[in-house]
Image: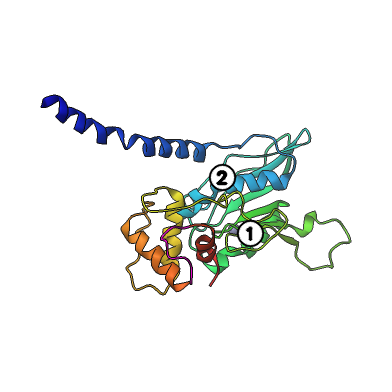
Amino acid sequence: MRRAAMTQRDVPVLEPIVPHVKRVLEAFLQNLSRAGFPFQSADIAAITALDEIYYKSVANNWEFAGRIFKRSGKYFYTSPRTLKSSRESDPGLKLPNVENIGTYHSHAGQFLPTDELVSPKDKLKAELGKDVSYVITPRGKIMKYIPISLSPPGTKPPGSLGHEEVLRQGLGGGASKFGFHQQLFSPRELQKYGDRGDTIKVVQMLLNKRPPSALALLVPDGIFGAKTLARVTEFQTLHQLARDGIVGPLTRRSLFKMG
Ligand SMILES: [Zn+2]
Protein backbone atom coordinates (compact mmCIF):
# COMPACT_ATOMS: atom_id res chain seq x y z
CA MET A 1 0.00 0.00 0.00
CA ARG A 2 2.61 2.44 1.11
CA ARG A 3 4.83 1.63 -1.83
CA ALA A 4 2.03 2.19 -4.36
CA ALA A 5 1.18 5.54 -2.81
CA MET A 6 4.78 6.66 -3.10
CA THR A 7 4.98 5.65 -6.74
CA GLN A 8 1.83 7.54 -7.54
CA ARG A 9 3.20 10.59 -5.83
CA ASP A 10 6.54 10.31 -7.58
CA VAL A 11 5.14 10.44 -11.10
CA PRO A 12 3.73 13.99 -11.01
CA VAL A 13 6.99 15.15 -9.42
CA LEU A 14 8.94 13.89 -12.42
CA GLU A 15 6.59 15.25 -15.06
CA PRO A 16 7.27 19.00 -14.71
CA ILE A 17 11.00 18.39 -15.15
CA VAL A 18 10.86 18.46 -18.95
CA PRO A 19 9.21 21.91 -19.26
CA HIS A 20 11.43 23.08 -16.43
CA VAL A 21 14.60 22.01 -18.25
CA LYS A 22 13.23 23.63 -21.40
CA ARG A 23 12.70 26.91 -19.53
CA VAL A 24 16.15 26.83 -17.97
CA LEU A 25 17.69 26.18 -21.39
CA GLU A 26 15.68 28.99 -22.97
CA ALA A 27 16.71 31.39 -20.21
CA PHE A 28 20.32 30.33 -20.68
CA LEU A 29 20.16 30.86 -24.45
CA GLN A 30 18.37 34.20 -24.01
CA ASN A 31 21.11 35.38 -21.70
CA LEU A 32 23.97 34.29 -23.95
CA SER A 33 25.50 37.49 -25.21
CA ARG A 34 27.74 37.93 -28.18
CA ALA A 35 28.99 41.29 -26.97
CA GLY A 36 32.73 41.44 -27.62
CA PHE A 37 32.58 38.82 -30.43
CA PRO A 38 33.93 39.87 -33.87
CA PHE A 39 31.57 40.54 -36.80
CA GLN A 40 32.19 41.16 -40.51
CA SER A 41 30.32 44.46 -40.65
CA ALA A 42 29.02 47.16 -38.34
CA ASP A 43 25.46 46.47 -39.53
CA ILE A 44 25.63 42.77 -38.59
CA ALA A 45 27.15 43.59 -35.19
CA ALA A 46 24.39 46.14 -34.56
CA ILE A 47 21.57 43.82 -35.68
CA THR A 48 22.90 41.05 -33.41
CA ALA A 49 23.08 43.47 -30.48
CA LEU A 50 19.59 44.82 -31.13
CA ASP A 51 18.04 41.35 -31.46
CA GLU A 52 19.69 40.43 -28.18
CA ILE A 53 18.04 43.29 -26.28
CA TYR A 54 14.69 43.26 -28.09
CA TYR A 55 12.62 41.02 -25.79
CA LYS A 56 14.13 42.29 -22.56
CA SER A 57 13.48 45.82 -23.74
CA VAL A 58 9.86 45.38 -24.81
CA ALA A 59 8.91 43.02 -21.96
CA ASN A 60 10.29 45.40 -19.29
CA ASN A 61 9.42 48.61 -21.15
CA TRP A 62 13.02 49.83 -20.79
CA GLU A 63 15.43 51.16 -23.38
CA PHE A 64 18.83 49.47 -23.72
CA ALA A 65 21.91 50.91 -25.45
CA GLY A 66 25.53 50.24 -26.29
CA ARG A 67 28.31 51.05 -28.76
CA ILE A 68 29.57 49.65 -32.05
CA PHE A 69 33.30 49.83 -32.71
CA LYS A 70 35.98 48.55 -35.08
CA ARG A 71 39.31 47.00 -34.16
CA SER A 72 41.81 45.14 -36.40
CA GLY A 73 39.35 45.06 -39.30
CA LYS A 74 36.51 43.50 -37.27
CA TYR A 75 33.36 45.01 -35.77
CA PHE A 76 32.15 44.57 -32.19
CA TYR A 77 29.40 45.74 -29.88
CA THR A 78 29.63 46.56 -26.19
CA SER A 79 27.34 44.96 -23.58
CA PRO A 80 23.92 46.61 -23.48
CA ARG A 81 23.23 49.06 -20.66
CA THR A 82 19.91 50.27 -19.32
CA LEU A 83 18.76 53.17 -17.16
CA LYS A 84 15.50 51.22 -16.59
CA SER A 85 13.66 54.03 -18.37
CA SER A 86 11.13 53.78 -21.19
CA ARG A 87 12.34 57.06 -22.72
CA GLU A 88 16.09 57.23 -22.25
CA SER A 89 19.22 55.16 -22.61
CA ASP A 90 22.95 55.76 -22.42
CA PRO A 91 25.34 53.85 -24.71
CA GLY A 92 28.35 54.77 -22.58
CA LEU A 93 31.44 56.78 -23.47
CA LYS A 94 33.42 56.34 -26.67
CA LEU A 95 36.09 53.69 -26.31
CA PRO A 96 39.81 54.50 -26.40
CA ASN A 97 42.21 52.94 -28.95
CA VAL A 98 39.47 51.71 -31.32
CA GLU A 99 37.52 53.19 -34.20
CA ASN A 100 34.17 54.20 -32.72
CA ILE A 101 31.46 53.58 -35.33
CA GLY A 102 28.34 54.54 -33.45
CA THR A 103 25.65 53.49 -31.01
CA TYR A 104 22.73 51.08 -30.86
CA HIS A 105 19.59 51.38 -28.77
CA SER A 106 16.10 49.96 -28.41
CA HIS A 107 12.81 51.77 -28.10
CA ALA A 108 10.74 50.38 -25.23
CA GLY A 109 7.48 48.48 -25.33
CA GLN A 110 4.81 51.13 -25.63
CA PHE A 111 3.92 50.33 -29.26
CA LEU A 112 3.33 53.99 -30.14
CA PRO A 113 3.67 55.07 -33.78
CA THR A 114 6.41 57.53 -32.70
CA ASP A 115 8.46 54.61 -31.32
CA GLU A 116 8.74 53.25 -34.87
CA LEU A 117 10.96 56.15 -36.00
CA VAL A 118 14.50 57.35 -35.43
CA SER A 119 13.46 60.25 -33.21
CA PRO A 120 14.63 63.85 -33.69
CA LYS A 121 16.52 63.49 -30.39
CA ASP A 122 18.23 60.31 -31.69
CA LYS A 123 19.31 62.24 -34.80
CA LEU A 124 20.58 65.16 -32.77
CA LYS A 125 22.64 62.84 -30.56
CA ALA A 126 24.06 61.13 -33.67
CA GLU A 127 24.99 64.48 -35.21
CA LEU A 128 26.61 65.79 -32.03
CA GLY A 129 28.52 62.59 -31.32
CA LYS A 130 29.37 61.93 -35.01
CA ASP A 131 27.94 58.46 -34.39
CA VAL A 132 26.01 56.19 -36.72
CA SER A 133 22.80 55.39 -34.83
CA TYR A 134 21.15 51.96 -34.95
CA VAL A 135 17.63 51.60 -33.49
CA ILE A 136 15.25 48.68 -32.96
CA THR A 137 11.58 49.56 -32.50
CA PRO A 138 8.91 47.75 -30.43
CA ARG A 139 7.67 46.13 -33.63
CA GLY A 140 11.16 44.79 -34.37
CA LYS A 141 12.07 47.21 -37.17
CA ILE A 142 15.79 48.02 -37.36
CA MET A 143 16.87 51.43 -38.65
CA LYS A 144 20.22 53.03 -39.30
CA TYR A 145 20.86 56.77 -39.26
CA ILE A 146 24.11 58.17 -40.66
CA PRO A 147 24.59 61.76 -39.52
CA ILE A 148 25.30 64.49 -42.05
CA SER A 149 28.74 64.95 -40.45
CA LEU A 150 29.68 61.39 -41.50
CA SER A 151 28.17 61.55 -45.01
CA PRO A 152 30.76 61.79 -47.80
CA PRO A 153 31.33 65.45 -48.81
CA GLY A 154 29.24 66.66 -51.70
CA THR A 155 26.56 63.98 -51.33
CA LYS A 156 24.16 66.10 -49.34
CA PRO A 157 22.66 69.48 -50.11
CA PRO A 158 23.39 72.03 -47.37
CA GLY A 159 20.91 71.94 -44.53
CA SER A 160 19.66 68.44 -45.27
CA LEU A 161 19.58 65.74 -42.61
CA GLY A 162 21.66 62.61 -42.63
CA HIS A 163 20.91 59.34 -44.33
CA GLU A 164 18.20 57.07 -42.94
CA GLU A 165 17.82 53.43 -43.91
CA VAL A 166 15.60 50.53 -42.83
CA LEU A 167 17.92 47.55 -42.33
CA ARG A 168 15.18 45.14 -41.44
CA GLN A 169 11.41 45.44 -41.50
CA GLY A 170 9.49 44.82 -38.33
CA LEU A 171 7.24 41.93 -37.45
CA GLY A 172 4.34 43.57 -39.25
CA GLY A 173 5.85 42.49 -42.56
CA GLY A 174 7.72 43.73 -45.62
CA ALA A 175 11.17 43.00 -47.04
CA SER A 176 14.37 45.00 -46.66
CA LYS A 177 18.15 44.76 -46.86
CA PHE A 178 18.44 42.09 -44.16
CA GLY A 179 15.15 40.34 -44.86
CA PHE A 180 12.18 39.69 -42.67
CA HIS A 181 12.65 39.32 -38.90
CA GLN A 182 14.31 35.88 -39.15
CA GLN A 183 16.17 36.53 -35.92
CA LEU A 184 13.29 37.49 -33.68
CA PHE A 185 11.10 34.49 -34.43
CA SER A 186 11.84 31.47 -36.55
CA PRO A 187 8.99 31.10 -39.08
CA ARG A 188 7.70 27.94 -37.40
CA GLU A 189 7.84 29.27 -33.84
CA LEU A 190 4.50 28.98 -32.06
CA GLN A 191 3.32 30.51 -28.80
CA LYS A 192 0.56 28.55 -27.15
CA TYR A 193 -1.36 27.79 -23.98
CA GLY A 194 0.99 26.87 -21.14
CA ASP A 195 4.04 28.71 -22.56
CA ARG A 196 5.94 31.24 -20.48
CA GLY A 197 8.57 33.91 -21.00
CA ASP A 198 9.33 37.32 -22.45
CA THR A 199 7.86 36.44 -25.86
CA ILE A 200 4.50 35.77 -24.17
CA LYS A 201 4.77 39.11 -22.33
CA VAL A 202 5.24 40.83 -25.69
CA VAL A 203 2.18 39.06 -27.12
CA GLN A 204 0.11 40.10 -24.07
CA MET A 205 1.22 43.74 -24.37
CA LEU A 206 0.35 43.74 -28.06
CA LEU A 207 -3.09 42.23 -27.40
CA ASN A 208 -3.70 45.04 -24.89
CA LYS A 209 -2.79 47.57 -27.60
CA ARG A 210 -5.12 46.08 -30.21
CA PRO A 211 -8.73 46.95 -29.56
CA PRO A 212 -11.57 46.25 -29.91
CA SER A 213 -11.94 43.58 -27.28
CA ALA A 214 -14.92 42.54 -25.22
CA LEU A 215 -12.51 41.00 -22.70
CA ALA A 216 -10.54 42.54 -19.85
CA LEU A 217 -7.00 43.86 -20.34
CA LEU A 218 -4.31 41.25 -19.71
CA VAL A 219 -1.71 41.47 -16.99
CA PRO A 220 1.55 41.08 -18.95
CA ASP A 221 2.97 38.36 -16.70
CA GLY A 222 4.53 36.22 -19.42
CA ILE A 223 2.22 33.27 -18.71
CA PHE A 224 0.02 32.06 -21.57
CA GLY A 225 -3.02 31.04 -19.51
CA ALA A 226 -6.78 30.92 -20.05
CA LYS A 227 -7.25 34.71 -20.28
CA THR A 228 -4.48 35.09 -22.85
CA LEU A 229 -5.94 32.17 -24.80
CA ALA A 230 -9.37 33.86 -24.83
CA ARG A 231 -7.83 37.12 -26.09
CA VAL A 232 -5.81 35.37 -28.80
CA THR A 233 -8.89 33.48 -30.01
CA GLU A 234 -10.94 36.68 -29.99
CA PHE A 235 -8.19 38.49 -31.92
CA GLN A 236 -8.07 35.68 -34.50
CA THR A 237 -11.86 35.83 -34.95
CA LEU A 238 -11.78 39.61 -35.47
CA HIS A 239 -8.94 39.34 -37.99
CA GLN A 240 -10.26 36.40 -40.01
CA LEU A 241 -7.42 34.14 -38.89
CA ALA A 242 -7.61 30.42 -38.11
CA ARG A 243 -9.22 30.30 -34.68
CA ASP A 244 -6.79 27.88 -33.04
CA GLY A 245 -5.63 30.00 -30.07
CA ILE A 246 -2.01 29.54 -31.16
CA VAL A 247 0.20 32.51 -32.03
CA GLY A 248 1.98 31.44 -35.22
CA PRO A 249 3.47 33.53 -38.06
CA LEU A 250 0.14 34.86 -39.43
CA THR A 251 -1.35 35.82 -36.06
CA ARG A 252 2.00 37.30 -35.04
CA ARG A 253 2.21 39.40 -38.19
CA SER A 254 -1.34 40.66 -37.65
CA LEU A 255 -0.58 41.51 -34.01
CA PHE A 256 2.54 43.48 -34.90
CA LYS A 257 0.89 45.47 -37.72
CA MET A 258 0.51 49.18 -37.14
CA GLY A 259 -2.82 50.84 -36.51
ZN1 LIG B 1 15.59 56.54 -29.74
Residue to which mark 1 is pinned: 122
- Residue type for callout 1: Asp
- Residue type for callout 2: Glu
Along the viewing direction, whichever of 239 and 257 lies nearer the viewer = 239
Task: Report the image quarter containing ligand 1.
Answer: bottom right
Answer yes or no: disc 1 within 8 Å of ligand 1: yes
Disc 1 to disc 2, C-alpha distance = 20 Å
Q: Is residue 165 above or below residue 22?
A: below
Residue 52: which disc?
A: 2
Question: In the rendered structure, which segment of residues is drawn in magenta?
Answer: 240-247
The residue sitting at 43% across, 71% down in the picture is 237
The residue sitting at 58% across, 48% down in the picture is 51
> Is disc 2 surrounded by few (<14), some (14 to 19) or many (20+) residues within 10 Å?
many
Q: Earlier in the sequence, mark 1 or mark 2?
A: 2
In the image, is 19 to the left or to the right of 187?
left
| Percent of width and height locating residue 102 | 69, 48
| Percent of width and height locating residue 23 | 41, 39
Q: Nearer the viewer, mark 1 or mark 2?
A: 2
